[in-house]
C-alpha cells in the first residue's frame, strides 16, 4: 500500500508483479479514472487517502488493503472526486466514517454510503480541468528537475568515474592506491572533502517559522529538497543545516533519501548533515547521492529492524581527488544544473500553494467556476 501514500496519481510507477487467474484479474483490474482509497492507516489522516488511476500503460491490479471506486461518468467526474477528497471538506467527510481504533480504517460499505454535496457533472469537469492544470505544471517541472539532475550526474560520472575530463585526454595514467588515475589526481576519502556538522538546537529557542526537515520530507532519489515543515511544530533538539548542505537519511539508507538543502534550517537527527568543502562541493554532492555510495551505506548499516548508516564507516569511502581546475569546473556544472532545479522547485511550491488555496473554494462552490477563464488561469499560473 506504500504506493498509494507515495503518489496521488497512479500510472506508470514501478510496482510488484503477481500472477492472477482471468477471474481474479477481472475482479481486481484497475482502469483509467478508478479511485483507490486506503482501507486502513496508523494515523487518522491516512484512512481513506485517495489516489487516482490515470492511463495505466499496462495491466494494473490492487491489493486488499485498498478500496476501488469506479465512478459513473454520467454522474461524477473521477478527477473532481479525487480533488474533493483532498479538500478540507472531503477529508472531514472521510474522517466521519473512519473507525478510530489502534489502526484507523474505513470500509467499502461505509464509503459507498457516504453522502457528499457536489455540483453537476459539467461543473465538476470544469473544476477538475482547472485543478489538473496546476498538477500538470507541477509534474512537468518535476520531470525537468529530474532531467537536470541526470544531466549533472552523467557529467560527474564522465569526469570522476571514467576520468574523461574535456581537454585532459592526453594526460598520462599513473598508479595510485585507488588504481589507475590521471596524473595530477590523488587517492583520498570522502572525509577529505566534507565535514559532518554536529551542531544542534532547541526548536523552542529559534524562529518558529524556520524550515524544519524530517525524513518524511526528503524525497527518494531526488537531489532537490522540495518540502519541509517549521520549527514551531518540533519538540526535541534538532540538527542545524545550512543552504548547500547535503542531508543524508541514515535510517534505512536503502530508501536513498539524499538531498541538497535549498534553505537554512533544522532537521531530524536521523539525517546526517554533510557540509562539503567549498572547493569540492559538486563532487561531494554527487558522491554522497550516488547509487554506489547509498548501497555501501546500506551494506554497512547497523541494526536489523531499523538499520542506521554509520558515518565513521561512510567517511572512509574512497574517492579520487582531482586537480583544482577540475573541481572548480565541476562546481560550476553542478551549481548551474541544481540551481535551475531549485528554481523549478520554488515555482512548484508557489503553484501548490495557489492550487491548495483554490481547491476548497472550487469544490464547495465558493468560487463560480463558470466565471473563470481557463486560459487566464493558465497564464497566471506560469507567470
Image (cartoon, helix red, strand yellow):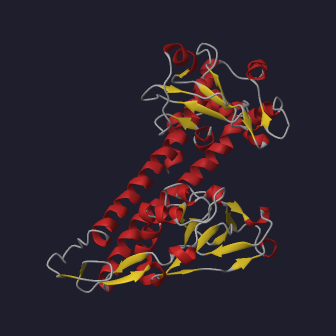
Which of 268 and 232 lies nearest the eye of the viewer? 268
> Can residue 370 be seen in the rendering of this structure?
no
Q: Is residue 210 above or below residue 275?
A: above
Q: Residue furthest right?
A: 100
Quarter of the view holding residue 38: top right
Q: Residue at x 32, y 78 (%)?
A: 178
Percent x, y for residue 245?
A: 54, 73
Residue 148, image quadrant: bottom left
With respect to residue 316, does 132 lie above or below? above
Give the residue at x 43% y 48%: 143
Place of residue 59 in the rendered image (x, y in percent of width and height, measured from the top left): 46, 25
Question: Is 303 situated left or right of 23 in this image?
Answer: right
Q: Position of residue 97 (x, y in %)?
A: 82, 28
Q: Is residue 200 above or below residue 107?
A: below
Which residue of the protein is positioned furthest toward the front in this rendering? Answer: 304
Q: Residue pushed farthest left?
A: 170
Q: Is residue 367 left or right of residue 136?
A: right
Depth check, front residue: 69 or 271: 271
Whether residue 53 is visible here, answered yes or no, is yes
Horizontal and vertical percent position of residue 273:
59, 73
Residue at x 26% of width, y 68% of height: 162
Amino acid at each position: 500500500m506504500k504506493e498509494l501514500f507515495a503518489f496521488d496519481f497512479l500510472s506508470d510507477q514501478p510496482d510488484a508483479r503477481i500472477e492472477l487467474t482471468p477471474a481474479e484479474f477481472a475482479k481486481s483490474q484497475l482502469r483509467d479514472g478508478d479511485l483507490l482509497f486506503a482501507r486502513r492507516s496508523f494515523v487518522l489522516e491516512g484512512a481513506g487517502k485517495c489516489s487516482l488511476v490515470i492511463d495505466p500503460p499496462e495491466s494494473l491490479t490492487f491489493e486488499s488493503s485498498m478500496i476501488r471506486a469506479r465512478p459513473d461518468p454520467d454522474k461524477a467526474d473521477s478527477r473532481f472526486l479525487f480533488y474533493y477528497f483532498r479538500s478540507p471538506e472531503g477529508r472531514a467527510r472521510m474522517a466521519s466514517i473512519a473507525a478510530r481504533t489502534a489502526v484507523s480504517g474505513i470500509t467499502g460499505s461505509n464509503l459507498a454510503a457516504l453522502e457528499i454535496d457536489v455540483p453537476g457533472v459539467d461543473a465538476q469537469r470544469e473544476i477538475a480541468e482547472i485543478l489538473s492544470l496546476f498538477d500538470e505544471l507541477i509534474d512537468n517541472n518535476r520531470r525537468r528537475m529530474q532531467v537536470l539532475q541526470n544531466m549533472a550526474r552523467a557529467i560527474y560520472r564522465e569526469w570522476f568515474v571514467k576520468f574523461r575530463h574535456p581537454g585532459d585526454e592526453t594526460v598520462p595514467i599513473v598508479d595510485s592506491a585507488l588504481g589507475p588515475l590521471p596524473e595530477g589526481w590523488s587517492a583520498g576519502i570522502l572525509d577529505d572533502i566534507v565535514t559532518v556538522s554536529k551542531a544542534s538546537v532547541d526548536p523552542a529557542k529559534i524562529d518558529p517559522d524556520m524550515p524544519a526537515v524530517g525524513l518524511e520530507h526528503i524525497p527518494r532519489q531526488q537531489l532537490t529538497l522540495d518540502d519541509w515543515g517549521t520549527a514551531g511544530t518540533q519538540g526535541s533538539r534538532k540538527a542545524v543545516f545550512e543552504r548547500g548542505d547535503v542531508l543524508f537519511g541514515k535510517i534505512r539508507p536503502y530508501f536513498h533519501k539524499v538531498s541538497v538543502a535549498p534553505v537554512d534550517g533544522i532537521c531530524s537527527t536521523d539525517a546526517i548533515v554533510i557540509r562539503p568543502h567549498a572547493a569540492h562541493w559538486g563532487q561531494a554532492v554527487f558522491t554522497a547521492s550516488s547509487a554506489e555510495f547509498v548501497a555501501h551505506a546500506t551494506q554497512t548499516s547497523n541494526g536489523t529492524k531499523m538499520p542506521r548508516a554509520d558515518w565513521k564507516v561512510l567517511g572512509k569511502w574512497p574517492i579520487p581527488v582531482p586537480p583544482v581546475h577540475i573541481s572548480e569546473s565541476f562546481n560550476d556544472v553542478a551549481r548551474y544544473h541544481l540551481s535551475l532545479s531549485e528554481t523549478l522547485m520554488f515555482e512548484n511550491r508557489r503553484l501548490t500553494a495557489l492550487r491548495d488555496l483554490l481547491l476548497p473554494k472550487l469544490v464547495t462552490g465558493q468560487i463560480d467556476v463558470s466565471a473563470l477563464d481557463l486560459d487566464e488561469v493558465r497564464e497566471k499560473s506560469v507567470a
